[in-house]
Amino acid sequence: MSPGILKELQFFGLAVLRGVLILILYDLIRIFRRVVPHGGLAVALEDVLYWAGTALLVFQLLYRENDGAVRGYALLAVAAGMLFYHQTVSGFAVTHTSKVLNVCLGFLLKPFRFVWKKVVQVVKVAVRFYKKKLKKKLKEFIIILFS
């Protein structure tokens, strides 16, 4: 096999692996979103950062391995790697990893939830107590002020 063809096959394989890496990174974001719920603004920011990082990864691949030349088959190889990973591992990995992390975090955070509930109860009682005292002092102040 000629060295040129071997180099192109190597480049194709690296592009496929880069596609797999790109989707693995997105799966990490998906897992994070399932474990730590957050709003639309945070999701949008994560997506913008992800796509900027993805563009840098593809650019770095093209620059380092192909002297910056954009080849259609390289982009196709990246897409093929993404499709392969998505069809084989992605769903299973995201579902089960997020379930395991949720169970672990639930177990680890259980004592903190108990303590937090007690702290909230104490704060509520203190607020009610001081609210009554504050009302009484405010009434006395108004009576003194206007008498």
Image: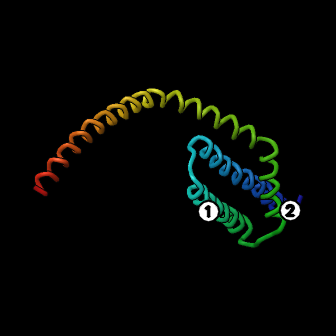
Question: In the displayed image of the protein, which residue is found farthest to the right?
Answer: 1
Instruction: Write down the quadrant of residue 11 in the picture.
Output: bottom right
Mark 1: secondary structure: helix
The location of residue 25, given as percent across then percent down, is: 65, 51
- Real-space Cα distance between discs 1 and 2? 36 Å
| Left or right: 61 in relation to 117 | right
Question: Around disc 1, counting alpha carbons within 10 Å, would you say few (fewer than 14), some (14 to 19), or many (20 or more)?
Answer: few
Disc 2 marks which residue? 5
Residue kind at label 2, given as amino acid type: Ile
Q: Which part of the image, by quadrant, shows the N terminus?
A: bottom right
Residue 37 drawn above or below residue 58: above
Residue kind at label 1, given as amino acid type: Val
Disc 1 marks which residue? 48
The location of residue 44, given as percent across then percent down, is: 61, 59
Which of disc 2 and disc 1 is earlier in sequence? 2
Residue 39 drawn above or below residue 127: below
